Image: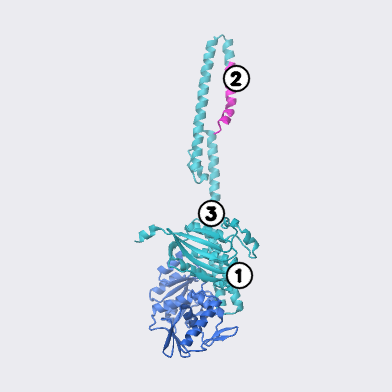
Chain colours: A cyan, B blue
Amino acid sequence: MNGKLYWKQKLPVMFLNVLCMVGLAVFLWVTGNSIDGIFLILLIWIAVLTARLVAAYYSRREQMKNLLKLAEQLEERYLLSEVMEKPVRADDLVYYRLLKLAGKSMLEQVNEVRRERTQYKEYVEQWVHEIKTPITAMKLLCENNHSQVTAELLVQLEKVNRYTEQALYYARSEHTEKDYSVREIRLFDVVHQSIAENKYLLLQNGVGINLRETDDTVYSDEKWLCFILNQLIVNSVKYRTKQPVLKFYTEHQGSQIILCVQDNGIGIDAGDLQRIFEKGFTGKNGREALQNSTGIGLYLCKRLCDKLGIGICADSEGSGTSLRLIFHINDFIQQVQD
Amino acid sequence: MKYRILIIEDDVVIQTQLRNLLAGNGYETEAINDFPVSMEQLKSFQPHLILLDIKLPGSDGFSVCSQIRTFSDVPIIFVTSCNTDMDELNSIMLGGDAFVTKPYNTAILLAKTASLLKRAYSVNGQETLSCHGITLHLESGKIEYADRQTDLTKTELKTLYYLFKHAGTICTRADIVEYLWDNRLYVDDNTLSVNINRIRDKLSAIGVNDFIKTKHRQGYII
């Protein structure tokens, strides 16, 4: 509470008191009281008034301080009116009621938006599942009727599937609920899976695959991880050079297993490297290369990684990019199993 | 003997194409067109394996699965677009043997089908393929001609397997590469040439010449 302002607003009261004091003094003097008597009365008056004002100031200050503290401790501040003590002063009560009303309408709004979001998320999920049926039908039609045209179509279908998956995972990543299940997975099984999902894209672009296969296992969600790898593979193909090669290998570092996805593409500018995981960031390559870049792919990867507790970082030295997914091996899980 | 596979899927195009795909791979197929699924129809077909969609008109795949499990242990593969963990867990809890999500990789679907059939009806003896008196031993990875044998690498074996399976027709290089990729062998065009040459060397070592013929600009044929 601003003390200066408080006292300034008390000036009229004090002025009124002084006025009354002067009036009383004049009256007493005229009616023939002694100067000492008048001074005594005035002194007592001033003492009582000061005590009252100071006490009121401190109690008010304490009250306000408590309220501010309460508000600071609350995570959802719009709920303040629900937890604060009901005030006793008449004008405070009015403010209290206003606060309650504001809080209530706020709560209604928040719930409304939350419900809409959930519904929208559910709609997106359902939509993705429904669109998968025609995609599957088209894919089967193409694979059963091999020709030059269907080969091209399959590449496009892979793309369609990828974009729909992206929409699905975007919807999922926005939500705070856990939509994943963590279990032990063999890293290279996921690598094989995402290569299979991008088979036509990789074959069409003549991408060489170089695996240093190991039996390393990590605890994570297979589908999310596969989605992340898909994004990395697509990026590598997007920013490829002649004779593209994609390398997958693992490294051990203390209690970490690192899955590296390395390409020999055009690489990333040192200046851009810090920002590639930002939403909507396209960088020099994204803008200059012929491909249109959305700045969503890596941002989503980062988000999903954060949720799964996987570290993700990029390296680029001149040409080629190496994306690392860092998994922490938890002794705890091992101990529980033993 | 041909294995009979029953397809329970309400999307007509997918159903037809799945039947084409499976028929092309040597399976006998049947599909159910009346929903909800009648168990009598299902029993009368006596399938060796069932492909089951989760979203079906009338009833869902889970309840169909648990109904089937009351009288049969036939392998069931769930094919679905619902790829949440709950669905996967449900399908396994109710007795499904595998779970393939749409849009499925046909190679993976076929591989799962084959391995489930193999496990359920344990085919006895070594699997072999023969063509022009040359025998390919799939289990041991050997090729044999007139009592002379030679070992093959995994890539060579798979390449030969594909050619044997399509004996008499031209196999394009792209198709062979795609098939190898489906088997997790990521070879490129050059590596395929190297492999074909190596196979020819190995074949001539056991006395077979000109087995794999090159069709210019088209591919290979045996």
Mark 3 to mark 1: distance in Å?
Answer: 48 Å
From the image, tell me which residue sits under label 1: A242
**Quadrant into which the C terminus of chain A falls:** bottom left
Residue A220: image location, x then y, percent: 45, 62
In the rendered structure, which disc, 3 or 1, sits on the residue that comes first in sequence? 3
In the rendered structure, which disc, 3 or 2, sits on the residue that comes first in sequence? 2
Residue A14 within the magenta-colored segment of the rendering = yes
Is there CB contact under 8 Å for labels 3 and 1? Answer: no
Task: Please state which of the two labelled residues, at mark 3 or mark 1, is closer to the viewer.
Answer: 1
Q: Residue at x 52, y 11 (%)?
A: A37
Q: Classify residue A34 by image quadrant.
A: top right
Q: Which mark is residue A114?
A: 3
Is there CB contact under 8 Å for labels 2 and 1? Answer: no
| Subunit bearing disc 2 | A
Reply above or below: B122 against B99.
below
* Amino acid on which the number 2 mark rests in the picture: Leu
- Front residue (pair B49, A98): B49
Q: Classify residue A131 by image quadrant.
A: bottom right
The magenta stretch is A1-23
Q: Secondary structure at mark 2?
A: helix
Residue A245: image location, x then y, percent: 55, 69
| Subunit bearing disc 1 | A
